[in-house]
Amino acid sequence: MTGSAGPAGPGRPPAGAAAPVERLRALCLALPEVSERVSHGEPTWFAGAGRRSRVFVMLADHHHDDRLAFWCPAAAGVQEFLIAEDRERYFRPPYVGHRGWVGVRLDAAPVDWARIEDLVGDAYALVTG
């Protein structure tokens, strides 16, 4: 991974966060034409090649609050639906929440990996479609 500086350096989660981050990374990198780069100090996944690549998942590892989470774009109404369904797991992230992005906690047990896979796939489709 570009920008890696060891087990807990820039772009690397602390040891306790490694398992969910690695699982999220695997979901993202399994999609076509996806690359990972550090953006704003966090692992971030981009869809597409070259200048046309766009962010579709960004890790938020206690960067703005006490949560280990990721942010991704969502279709109209999805952010509101998820937050209404479970405020402990889903939230409106700073900076991009007003554009419909949703924050998803990775530290709220149990993690619903089937839903996360769907959200990641939908985010990818939004930025590549």
Image (cartoon, rainbow, N blue to C red):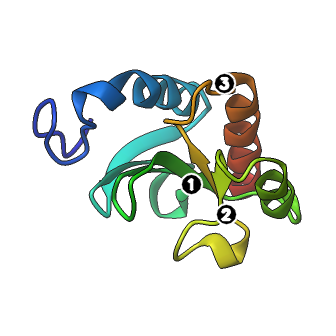
Spot occupied by residue 50 in the image (x, y as percentages of width and height): 45, 56
- Check disc 3 and report the residue beneath it: 113
Q: Label 3 near label 2: C-beta < 8 Å?
A: no
Front residue of 94/4: it is 94
Q: Secondary structure at mark 1?
A: strand
Q: Amino acid at mark 2?
A: Trp
Residue 28 visible? The answer is yes
- Check disc 1 and report the residue beneath it: 71
Front residue of 58/91: it is 91
Q: What is the CA distance from the residue labelled 1 to the residue labelled 3? A: 15 Å
Q: Amino acid at mark 3?
A: Trp
In the rendered structure, which disc, 1 or 3, sits on the residue that comes first in sequence? 1
Spot occupied by residue 122 in the image (x, y as percentages of width and height): 77, 44
> Along the horizontal axis of the image, is 35 left or right of 75?
left
In the rendered structure, which disc, 2 or 3, sits on the residue that comes first in sequence? 2
Judge the density around disc 2: few (<14), some (14-19), many (≥20) Cα neighbours within 10 Å. Answer: many
At horizontal 35% and vertical 31% (from top left) the residue drawn is 17
Q: Secondary structure at mark 3?
A: helix
Judge the density around disc 3: few (<14), some (14-19), many (≥20) Cα neighbours within 10 Å. Answer: some
Q: Amino acid at mark 1?
A: Trp
> Along the horizontal axis of the image, is 12 left or right of 92?
left
At horizontal 61% and vertical 32% (from top left) the residue drawn is 32
At horizontal 84% and vertical 49% (from top left) the residue drawn is 85
At horizontal 27% and vertical 35% (from top left) the residue drawn is 1
Above or below for 77 versus 72: below
Q: Secondary structure at mark 2?
A: loop
Front residue of 26/95: it is 95
Spot occupied by residue 86 in the image (x, y as percentages of width and height): 76, 47
Judge the density around disc 1: few (<14), some (14-19), many (≥20) Cα neighbours within 10 Å. Answer: many
Spot occupied by residue 80 in the image (x, y as percentages of width and height): 82, 63
Q: Label 2 near label 1: C-beta < 8 Å?
A: yes
